[in-house]
Image (cartoon, helix red, strand yellow):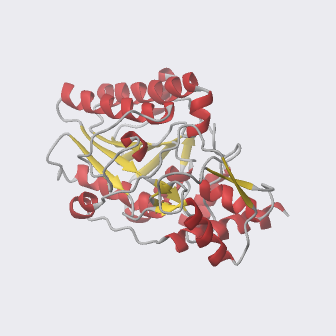
């Protein structure tokens, strides 16, 4: 196949699927997904088709199996970039099962970078995380903020992953990478046809909120109310998933147009606003006109007290501007949850 091809690993996942939609809308590339549905469903591609009107080919591949990756990519002659999302991402699960996270998140990245080297794929976007900053003293965090001790094995795999990509960029010529450290993805596509859908119990706040509101979760728990924050709950920088998706397309074009000054560059993706857990709950209750059943429990292992972004660099260099506020994120997530409920009837 001769069309310029972009590989999206984890294309059936939450952020991967929204990024595919943006790629289909804003580029003419042939988009290929690699996803083994370990935390997603094949129905995602039906949803993408409903929104974008285009079918996306997915290959059911375990990225820890390099031979399987090679077999798929041998079908394509002009792969010009890879966007690497595929990773396990639950902080509490990583605390319980650290070896699972180290094996999956690191081995898959090793294989993808090997493939880039062997097939001369020169442009790489790495899905990183604000968790690499750990419990940091100075807020907001910039890309130059020091990385502190990782608070969970998940966060540690992202720190290791970043170091691997940086080292790889130094080791060979003509390989360029962007590391996108995004903060807390939230919300759903404006069509309400696609959104966050973890297969197991959700660990992210917003799907826990929406599932509690419809009764799937009888009562949600706020993990800690004695942090040194304005209301005692953790503070996060919630960023709409579609805003994150747009940033990935901008970052890819930035590399393809050879605008990068260094082989490996890093950008924060956040709104720049810290929102507490209680503030997020209040926002949801307001936009949904629904009272949430919740209780306050003890702190959760692996949680950082407070973090939010300085996103100036992404705005200036990538020409990126987040569009959605917390109320819009909550409303879109609620519409997605209601869409799921309708489909389950």
- Residue 306 place in picture, x, y as percent: 44, 52
Visible in this render: residue 64?
Answer: no
Please indicate, yes or no, whether residue 273 appears anywhere in the rendered image: yes
Residue at the location (24% across, 58% down)? 313
In the picture, measured across the screen, residue 179 lies left or right of residue 58, that is left
Residue at 58% in and 59% down? 48
x then y, percent, for residue 15: 50, 52
Which of the 4 image quarters holds residue 314? bottom left
Please name whichever residue, 52 or 192, is drawn nearer the observer in this view of the structure: 192
Q: Quadrant of residue 96?
A: top right
* 112 or 74: nearer the viewer: 112
Question: What residue do we see at 36% from left, 42% from top?
Answer: 133
Q: Residue furthest left?
A: 261
Quarter occupied by residue 308: bottom left
- Which one is nearer the viewer's eye here, 285 or 336? 285
- Quarter of the figure that contains the N terminus: top left
The percent position of residue 82, horizontal first and vertical second, equals 38, 41
């Amino acid at each position: 196949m001769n069309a310029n091809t972009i590989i999206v690993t984890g294309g059936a996942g939450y952020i991967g699927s929204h990024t595919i939609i943006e790629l289909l809308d804003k580029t003419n590339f042939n988009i290929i997904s690699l996803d083994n549905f370990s935390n997603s469903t094949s129905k995602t591609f039906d949803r993408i088709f409903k929104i974008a009107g285009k079918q996306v080919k997915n290959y059911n591949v375990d990225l820890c199996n390099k031979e399987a990756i090679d077999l798929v990519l041998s079908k394509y002659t002009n792969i010009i970039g890879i966007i690497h999302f595929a990773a396990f991402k639950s902080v509490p699960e990583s605390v319980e099962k650290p070896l699972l996270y180290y094996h999956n998140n690191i081995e898959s990245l090793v294989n993808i970078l090997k493939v880039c080297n062997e097939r001369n794929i020169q442009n790489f976007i790495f899905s990183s995380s604000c968790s690499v900053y750990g419990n940091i003293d100075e807020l907001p965090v910039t890309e130059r903020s020091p990385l502190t001790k990782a608070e969970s094995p998940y966060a540690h795999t992202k720190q290791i992953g970043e170091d691997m990509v940086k080292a790889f960029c130094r080791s060979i010529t003509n390989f360029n990478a962007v590391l996108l450290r995004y903060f807390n993805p939230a919300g759903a596509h404006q069509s309400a046809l696609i959104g966050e859908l973890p297969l197991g119990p959700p660990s992210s706040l917003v799907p826990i909120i929406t599932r509690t509101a419809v009764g799937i979760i009888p009562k949600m728990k706020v993990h800690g109310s004695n942090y040194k924050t304005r209301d005692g709950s953790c503070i996060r920088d919630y960023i709409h998933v579609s805003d994150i998706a747009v940033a990935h397309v901008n970052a890819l074009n930035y590399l393809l147009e050879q605008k990068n000054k260094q082989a490996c560059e890093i950008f924060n993706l956040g709104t720049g606003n810290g929102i507490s857990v209680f503030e997020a709950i209040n926002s949801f209750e307001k936009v949904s006109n629904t009272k949430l059943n919740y209780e306050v429990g003890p702190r959760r292992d692996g949680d950082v007290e407070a973090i939010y972004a300085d996103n100036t660099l992404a705005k200036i260099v990538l020409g990126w501007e987040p569009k959605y506020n917390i109320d819009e994120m909550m409303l879109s997530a609620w519409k997605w949850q209601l869409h799921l409920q309708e489909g389950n009837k």
